[in-house]
Amino acid sequence: MTDINSFREETRSWLEDNCPAEMRNLTFHWEDAHKIYNTDAADLWRERMAEKGWIAPTWPSQYGGGSLTQEQAQMLSQEMGRIGAVSASTGMGLAMIGPTLLEFATEEQKQRHLPGICNGTIRWCQGYSEPNAGSDLASLQTRAVLEGDHFVINGQKIWTSGAQFADWMFALVRTDPDANKHDGISFVLLDMHQDGVTIKPIQLISGSSPFCETFLDDVIARRDDLIGELNKGWTVGKRLLQFERSGIGGLSGGARKKKKSVNEYAKTAKKYTGEVNGKIADTDARERILLHSMTERAFQLTAQRVMQESQTGKTPGAATSIFKLVGANLARDGAELKSDLMGFNGLGWEGEGFEKQELASTRSWLNSRAVTIYGGTNEVQMNIISKRVLGLPD
């Protein structure tokens, strides 16, 4: 038996013995992740996976990672998918700031911040957008003034996902108001548990409040929590966005796909439009489902191929915008297709006469609109693709 086959067998056995039943076969929207991970079963699963280093399986072991090869990590992902195990930890620490620190941080910064991500005890949020700086992010005006060994920060951030649950924020701040707008920005880390941090959740049309307004009044960030050079944070910030888009676009983890015995769209269509001899009765619905399902699968296979072709497993650069654009559209179109298949039952908001999954479908359809905006709008992604990937003129 080869070493890789031995690894698979050992991994399969360990997962069967150590993954709690409560952490298997769960379906939830990322907005509700804090509920799923705030349980005794989740704590136990997190502790066991952290001890193995498998919360961040490919990260170096000196920071709490597993030091697995890309092949081993993919195998771990496959075995978790086989039993329906959810990730032991999730969020921006693993998907965004962690990879950025591995690439840009000093050794001291890595030692200080990465272990808390690897063991799942520290939660992060993103301080990028502002009321007057969204797609034109470089127009941000949150000020950070260097005073001795720390920065004093004043300003407002908005759409800070999960800020109400976060322990730390990574933020872009203006440290030189007289420089060109892309040159006077720095990338800093700040503790959310301090005076001066005020968080106000924003209720969306879907009824949830995953995003927040965050006010920073004389908030402190340590000088040694500056990532990269002073006034050169735009480079760091852009790289982090590529990590974010790779996650939204399905590149993170090789786009692991849970095995499904039944196509959920087909199942919905049969229930609401009927079936004839085991086939969807509505030929138009059948064609729409076929086209969407083929596109989804082609996208997943493309993402897997891109990750496998990267010998280092390093996230691609500007090409992540392709996956973000296509992935966002697929998520939006899939939610819309499912609601359409339900007919009037897919329009319910509350009250009697609607099943639980029908009400969830309505909220999912509304939530899906945000995917084409956060992490950079579709229009921003198309601009990046045209300039940075295709090399078209401005």
Image: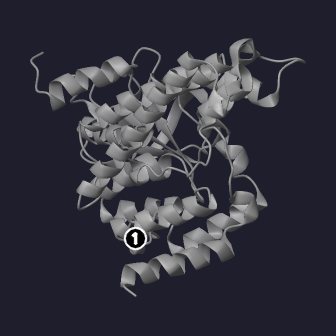
Name the residue at the top extreme.
344
Q: Which residue corresponds to mark 1? A: 72
180 vs 213, left or right, is left
Q: Which residue is drawn at 40% across and 74% down?
A: 62
189 vs 204, left or right, is left
Q: Nearer the viewer, residue 146 or 126?
A: 126
Question: Within the image, what quadrant is residue 203 found in?
Answer: top right
Q: In this view, does 162 lie above or below 256?
A: above
Q: In which quarter of the image is the C terminus?
A: top left
Per the image, label 1 sits on a secondary structure element best described as: helix
The reply to whether residue 297 is in sight is yes
User: What's the residue type where badge 1 is placed?
Assistant: Gln
Q: Which of 290 and 148 is in front in this view?
A: 290
Q: Where is residue 377 in the image (x, y as percent from the top left)?
A: 39, 21
Q: In which quarter of the image is the N terminus?
A: bottom left
Q: Which of 20 and 98 is in front in this view?
A: 20
Question: Within the image, what quadrant is residue 21 found in?
Answer: bottom right
Q: Where is residue 253 in the image (x, y as percent from the top left)?
A: 42, 54
Q: Where is residue 271 in the image (x, y as percent from the top left)?
A: 73, 27
Q: Where is residue 54 in the image (x, y as percent from the top left)?
A: 50, 68
Q: Which residue is drawn at 73% across and 11% down?
A: 344
236 vs 52, left or right, is left
Crowd class of label 1 (few under 14; some 14 to 19; many from 20; radius 10 Å): some
Name the residue at the bottom extreme.
1
Q: Which residue is drawn at 56% across and 52% down?
A: 259
Q: Is residue 352 above or below residue 50?
A: above
